[in-house]
């Protein structure tokens, strides 16, 4: 790595540290440092199991214990044995903790709005932030099953359709495509998978089943900020695993020649080109894979 690259990274680190108040003894003026505020935030967003909080924040057990103890002494958090396993512990916000969590949320939202207001190219800034946050959190990107009608799924599908419209020479109209019904991408027929980076959906893939031994992979998409991190490969592997679990033995998919990255992925991962198997107007490549 060049000296220039190192200098730019260190400059970026200093800027972020200053912007988020990482060195402040009173983060956002609430009387406690950033570490304690992040633990409170994690619990407020539903990460109650102490081991899950530790993994999410990347803290060692000793430091997390001290931070939790401090929040308990303030009357903001209680920790209790896990109802299903007494060896594990669960943290929960008290009423005072919920008020403090809400105060942090409001202040953080205001600070984010102020930052965007100061910068004349807001969308460019957000795209850069997405890229950095996804790259730094690549090891924490999770593949989860979701309802294809959920907000997260629709977020991915809307962006996927918009990208197809930009990349296809004649545009893309989903009403002309063989768009699968939601029930075909839910168990026991299929699944819909979402790649999630710290709560944000960054990719998706659908397994469209009919109840038989043959199913299709549909709607594989990864947002630009998460490309090159192996997310598409992980989504495809998860779809294949779900297909095996549903006793599906043959997978098929179609693709358009404009999607060169997807075509390269399919060929690298054992998909075989076959004859056309549907009358969808958009694809010009067709593949199959035996499980």
Image (cartoon, rainbow, N blue to C red):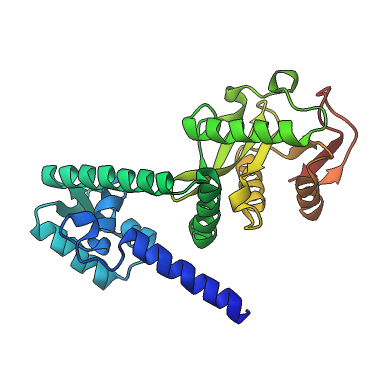
The residue lying toward the viewer, choosing from 60 and 108, is 108
Q: From the viewer's perspective, is 236 left or right of 40?
A: right
Q: From the viewer's perspective, is 19 left or right of 144?
A: left
Residue drawn 70% across the image and 18% down it: 175
The residue lying toward the viewer, choosing from 55 and 202, is 202
Q: From the viewer's perspective, is 97 left or right of 194?
A: left
The residue lying toward the viewer, choosing from 169 and 176, is 169
- Furthest-bottom residue in this view: 3
Residue drawn 25% across the image and 72% down it: 62
In the rendered image, which quarter contains the N terminus?
bottom right
x and y percentages locating residue 6 in the rendered image: 55, 77
Residue drawn 84% across the image and 22% down it: 279
* Residue 90 sits above or below residue 256 on the image: below
Q: From the viewer's perspective, is 145 left or right of 282?
A: left
Q: How many marks?
A: 0
Res. 28 in view: yes
x and y percentages locating residue 2 in the rendered image: 63, 80
Residue drawn 76% across the image and 51% down it: 265
x and y percentages locating residue 171 in the rendered image: 77, 28
x and y percentages locating residue 135 in the rendered image: 55, 59
Q: In which quarter of the view is residue 204 placed?
A: top right
Q: In which quarter of the view is residue 159 placed?
A: top right
The residue lying toward the viewer, choosing from 264 and 25, is 25
């Amino acid at each position: 790595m060049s000296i220039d690259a190192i200098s730019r990274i260190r400059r970026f680190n200093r800027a972020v540290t200053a912007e988020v108040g990482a060195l402040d003894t009173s983060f956002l003026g609430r009387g406690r440092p950033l570490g304690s505020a992040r633990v409170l935030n994690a619990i407020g967003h539903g990460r109650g199991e102490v081991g899950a909080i530790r993994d999410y924040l990347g803290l060692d057990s000793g430091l997390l214990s001290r931070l939790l103890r401090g929040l308990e002494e303030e009357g903001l958090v209680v920790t209790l044995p896990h109802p299903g396993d007494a060896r594990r512990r669960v943290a929960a916000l008290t009423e005072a903790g919920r008020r403090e969590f809400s105060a942090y949320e409001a202040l953080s939202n205001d600070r984010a709005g102020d930052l965007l207001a100061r910068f004349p190219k807001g969308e460019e800034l957000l795209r850069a932030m997405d890229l950095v946050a996804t790259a730094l959190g690549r090891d924490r990107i999770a593949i989860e099953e979701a309802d294809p009608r959920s907000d997260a799924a629709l977020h991915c599908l809307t962006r996927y359709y918009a990208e197809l419209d930009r990349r296809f020479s004649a545009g893309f109209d989903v009403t002309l495509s063989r768009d699968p019904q939601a029930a075909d991408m839910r168990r026991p027929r299929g699944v819909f998978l979402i790649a999630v980076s710290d709560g944000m959906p960054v990719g998706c893939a659908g397994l469209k089943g009919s109840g038989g031994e043959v199913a299709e992979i549909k709607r594989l998409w990864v947002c630009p900020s998460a490309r090159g991190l192996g997310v598409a490969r992980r989504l495809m592997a998860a779809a294949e695993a779900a297909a095996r679990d549903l006793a599906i033995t043959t997978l098929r998919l179609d693709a358009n020649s404009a999607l060169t990255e997807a075509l390269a992925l399919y060929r690298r991962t054992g998909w075989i080109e076959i004859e056309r198997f549907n009358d969808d107007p958009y694809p010009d490549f067709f593949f199959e894979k035996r499980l």
